[in-house]
Image (cartoon, helix red, strand yellow):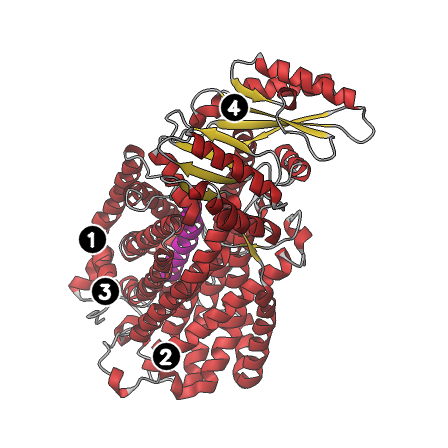
Amino acid sequence: MQTRGNLAARMGRWSARHRRAAVLGWLAFVAAAFLVGQVVPRGELTAAEQTLGAPAQAQRVLEENGWEEPASEMVLVQRDAGVPEAAATAALTDLVETLRGVPEATDVVSPLDGAPLVSADGRSVLVTLDVAGDSATADERIGPIQDAVAAVADRHDDVRVEQFGGTSADLALGETLDADFQRAELLSVPITLVVLLVTFGAVVAALVPLVFALTAFLASLGLLSLTSQVWHVDQTAQIVMLLIGLAVGVDYSLFYLKREREERAKGAGPADALDVAAATSGRSVLISGITVVVAMAGMFLTGFSVFTGVASATILVVAVSVLGSLTVLPATMAWLGDRVEKGRIPFLRRREAGPGRFWPAVLGAVLRRPLVAALAAGAALVALAVPALSMDLRSEGVQDLPQDLAVIQTYDRITEAFPGGPSPAEVVIEAPDVEAPEVQAAVAELRERALATGQVSEPIGVETNEAGTVAVVSVPLVGDGEEQASRDALATLADDVVPATVGEVDGVTAVVTGGTAYSVAFDELMADRTPWVFGFVLVLAFVLLLVSFRSVTVAVTAIVLNLLSVAAAYGAMVLVFEEGVGADLIGLDRTGAIVNWIPLFLFVILFGLSMDYHVFILSRIREGHDQGLPTRAAVARGITSSAGVVTSAAVIMVFVFLTFVTLSMTSMKQIGLGLAIAVLLDATVVRAVLLPAVMQLLGRANWYLPRWLRWLPELQHEPAAAAVLPGPRTAPEDSLATTRG
């Protein structure tokens, strides 16, 4: 078989001939990469890198001045309408005395000291405190404080006494989310194995893709320690690596293995079958892998470190999966040979010999009435996409966290009693001496003017660093921090109040930060960079498909169909997460809006992953076309021959993604459902109906290439005739693929 110009075929043949070196080399690579991950500390995102705009500037000011943010906590003391005030006062007094007797609690402040920590209706008061020592390790010392608060609550059961703060919330959320992710990881692996067992009907054949995907993920996780020195990452990057790594790793090996088994079922010899798989499925894996990498590279255009960290991690796991698919997979298959059928499962028939009855029946109906099928499928996708036009975006916040947690319910009560209190805007003031009279006078004026606007509320607090070079003024805004009232209040504070007060003092730098400021800055960044990301991904994907298939029509069609499935997924997300359709089925506590970073994230992920199916199917169709088949026959053979493997791959992806719907965080539910719906639509409506219908309607125009592009390299899609003839080849050099260790 000619392999000139086909990198995947050449690598596959080499690996099959040198399978011992390839397998041992892969295992050594995985072990070395994993060891690197244990030795080299991972580059974590800094606080400044996790934000942007004015909040990032404020964070840099704090870091440059050695600002040490204490681990602050607050305790809510709240009485119901029928409870006498004396009971609340007794509980408050007991709480303050108890906390001041706990060594781990410092700077205890309460209304008993004259602090303005009383709600407007007088039924709620706050006690604030700091956890002694380094804030980074506050979780190790917060236990006695929590025990003291719980003891006071037990002694005053007629009054609500509850604690909330960054450290206590992180502990409660950490336990819940860790359990969530462990459950998702534990669910995804057995689900994948079950689907593979059904697909192949044999234990060994099912284990090959799963083991390969897991080893590729482990290697990538180790190498992440190296790449993270350049592109810092957070925990999200590892989660995405698992999600995407398991999906593409299984898919790539599934495509490869199914094609090799298919050729063996047709009667091809071991070497021939492996050569065909390497030249066709291997090449499809290479193209689709490059497409995923290109799509994820678009995230770098955002300039946001969180996105670039996720992009680098995803690119890494995809690149490692592609490398393994082209090297260790052919070697493993050559080593196993027909032993890959070991562990046959009773009652599961062999599936390699044909596509079954369902998909050919569907395809037959589509090709008989292509216009009707195209209009019906297109209309269905467009109808599902329409709700996306009203998509409402917001920053991820407390509302996205598990609402049944006690700490979140406490947060809600504090927010209701003290609007803007738990997450206020902050004015970061830098000056040679923030204790100077003119600076202190400006801060006092800032407080007066801010309260006079009616858009902020008490308590307004001021903290300074030990060097006296930085002061942070906390200003609670009206609203919940995300609604327009909060954004208007932020604009008033940043554009009017601050410039007219501390901004007038010579040598003073004042920057407004906080949760609302971050949301505004992120929205502005997305509005500015999203068109560039979309354009980058679409243009490069078009070029890649054009070069791969030498057809403008195929490239345009693939991109349009991908955009349709992505838009339909957006629309479905709006129906579920904003309109509440089927919300109970996924354990959604409340409806609201789509988290603002998810649409862009889903676009690049989905655009890359959906190319798996398109490239694989289009390659099979192009094979038929190159062999001289008419359009209808080429489409029919290409889609029916790929139906089984694409269906299996899609089922695996859908179930893996749906495990994330079981998580407690709304953002994870949105990612999981969006990915699952898009993959499901892409593998059914798009692949089985819309794609064949459109290609049948276009006919010879499918392969249109202008004269001025005829210089593009011609990449072979059709395997050589010898590769599909029954029986093994007799050439000595080819026999090495099945005899040499």
Q: What stretch is highlighted in magenta?
A: 237-257
For label 3, the crowd category at 10 Å Cα-Cα, with few meaning under 14, some 14 to 19 and many 20 or more, is some
How crowded is the residue under tag 4: few (<14 C-alpha within 10 Å), some, or many (20+)?
A: many
- Mark 3 or 2: in front is 3
Using the rendered image of the protein, determine whether residue 636 is visible from the camera's viewpoint: yes
Circle 3 residue: 7
Which residue is most to the top?
A: 101
Q: Where is residue 685 in the image (x, y as percent from the top left)?
A: 54, 71
Tell me if 313 is positioned left or right of 414 in this view. Answer: left
Which residue is located at x 57 percent, y 52 percent?
488
The amino acid at mark 2 is: Gly
Q: Do the residues labelled 1 and 4 touch (CB within 8 Å)?
A: no
Q: Gap in Å between the C-alphas at discs 1 and 4?
A: 63 Å
Give the quadrant of residue 619: bottom left
Q: What residue type is labelled 3?
A: Leu
Give SS at disc 1. Answer: loop
Contact (CB < 8 A) between labels 2 and 1?
A: no
Provide the residue designation for mark 1: 18
Circle 2 residue: 624
Is there a contact, CB below 8 Å, between mark 4 and mark 3?
no
Label 2 – label 1 distance at C-alpha: 32 Å
- Pick whichever of labels 3 and 1 is earlier in the sequence: 3
Residue at x 48%, y 78% (from the top left corner): 692
In-front residue for pair 360/582: 582
Looking at the image, is 117 positioned above or below residue 546? above
